[in-house]
Image (tube, rainbow, N blue to C red):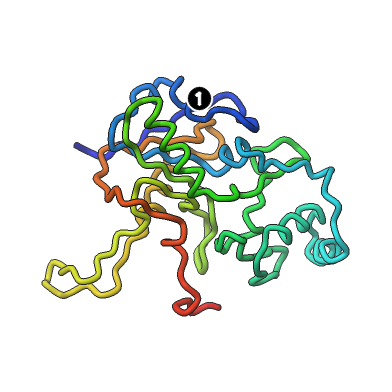
Amino acid sequence: MSLQIIPVKISKDVECGDDLVAMLLKTKDGKKIKNGDILVFTQKIISKQEGQKIDLSKIRPTLLATGIASAYKKDPRIVQLILDETKRIIRMKNGIIISQTHHGLVCANAGIDESNMEQGFATLLPKNADASALKLRRKIKTKTGKNVAVIISDTFGRPFREGQTDVAIGVSGISSVIDYEGKQDSFRRVLRVTAIAIADEICSASELVRGKTLHTPIAIVRNYKFDKKDGKLEDLLRVKSLDLFR
């Protein structure tokens, strides 16, 4: 069977405490979930559901945040959120702040996002997207009896390349990476360093049908055979000793 990627439309704006699984199962395609499906949820609806939506009017920037905001022509309240969510500032240039979040993710603005939000609000990344994915997977199993994998996706830029692509920030029920080390290629050469970030590739593929303005924050990936070993975000983060750019 050929691979299918099915967009799931959720017309209602997600709010804190909403039951995302119930919302999913009310949809036409959500009612037809099958064993072995991979459910990709966008970061935005997870953050909203978990209360990671921030009213910017309640943010009081520090002098440091105000100074950075003035230098880079940014909203000081957003800069304060970036600093609060940042473990390490990597680069600040041309109005862009690249930082490493407390989760270990390296991204622009520590994942703070104002898109698809009402004026004056922003979202933070989920506190623990692996735990969010596990919770959703278990709830789907309880309500439907189906064994599925769940991935939480977000949109990131990439070093040395233009444009953004979706990547995994939370994983449950599927290996994050397929490691081909020790296997032979088609010419019987032994592969030594080939590892495919399969969770990221699934997120990118799902973005092709979800889009940013279609009210489709969930995608069902079907007929893809995957390793059901539990992956995690940490598997996708390069360790410091192997990072050539630090």
Q: x, y percentage for residue 7? A: 42, 32
Q: Is residue 10 above or below residue 96?
A: above
Please provide percent x and percent y for residue 242: 44, 78
The residue located at (44%, 29%) in the rendering is: 8
* Front residue of this view, candidates 134 and 176: 134
**Quadrant in which residue 54 is drawn:** top right
Tell me the SS state at disc 1. helix
228 sits left or right of 135 in the view: left
Q: Residue at x 34, y 49 (%)?
A: 174
Residue shown at 11%/72% (left/top)? 188
**Residue farthest to the right, as pictured:** 63
Q: Which residue is mark 1?
A: 23
Measured from the top left, where is residue 99 in percent x and y?
Answer: 64, 65
Query: Residue 17, how many percent across, how many down?
Result: 62, 31
Along the viewing direction, whichever of 25 and 68 lies nearer the viewer: 25
Give the vertical position of 186 relative to 155 (above or below): below
Q: Is residue 41 toward the left or the right of residue 125 in the image?
A: left
Q: How many marks?
A: 1
Q: Quadrant of the C terminus?
A: bottom right
Up/down of 228 relative to 108, above or below: above
Q: Assess disc 1: are there few (<14), some (14-19) or many (≥20) residues with their C-alpha within 10 Å of its C-alpha.
A: some
Position of the N terminus by quadrant: top left
**Residue kind at label 1, given as amino acid type:** Met
